[in-house]
């Protein structure tokens, strides 16, 4: 839709519901919660096995530690 289209309706930024916009495009905040829970479980399992962190997190930990 273009700005000159008669169906276009301008909304002030204050009236914009960002959450509704994200939901309209398929975002589900519960997915983030589930992902975080899976990550916590995986880290706990690796800690119980004697490994320090997941491979994806190791480089970030090393970079932060060296700063």
Image (cartoon, rainbow, N blue to C red):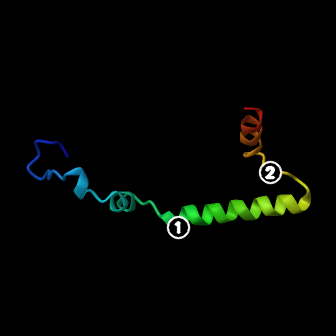
Q: Are marks 2 and 1 in contact (CB under 8 Å)?
A: no
Determine which quarter of the picture holds residue 45: bottom right
Q: Foreground residue, 63 or 8? A: 63
The residue under the point 76% across, 61% down is: 42
- Mark 2 or 1: the one toward you: 2
Screen quadrant of the C terminus: top right
**Can you give x and y, in whole percent of width and height, for residue 64 in the image?**
72, 38
Which residue extends farthest right? 50
Q: How would you rate the neighbour count of disc 2 (Cα within 10 Å): few for under 14, some for 14-19, many for 20 or more?
A: some
The residue under the point 80% across, 51% down is: 53
Comes first in the chain, label 2 or label 1 = 1
Tell me: residue 57, above or below residue 44: above
Determine which quarter of the picture holds residue 63: top right
Q: How would you rate the neighbour count of disc 1 (Cα within 10 Å): few for under 14, some for 14-19, many for 20 or more?
A: few
Which residue extends farthest left? 6
Residue 64 placement, left or right of 30 = right
Instruction: Please give the residue where the numbered disc 1 appears in the rendered image.
Output: 30
Instruction: Please give the residue where the numbered disc 2 appears in the rendered image.
Output: 53
Residue 22 placement, left or right of 52 = left
Mark 2 secondary-structure assignment:
loop
- Mark 2 to mark 1: distance in Å? 24 Å
| Residue 11: numbered disc | none
**Can you give x and y, in whole percent of width and height, for residue 41 in the image?**
74, 65
The residue under the point 24% across, 55% down is: 14
């Amino acid at each position: 839709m273009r700005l000159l289209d008669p169906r276009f309706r301008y909304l002030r930024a204050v009236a914009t519901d960002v959450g509704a916009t994200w939901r309209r495009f398929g975002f589900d905040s519960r997915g983030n919660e589930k992902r975080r829970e899976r990550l916590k479980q995986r880290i706990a399992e690796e800690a119980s096995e004697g490994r320090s962190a997941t491979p994806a997190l190791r480089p970030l930990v090393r970079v932060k530690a060296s700063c």
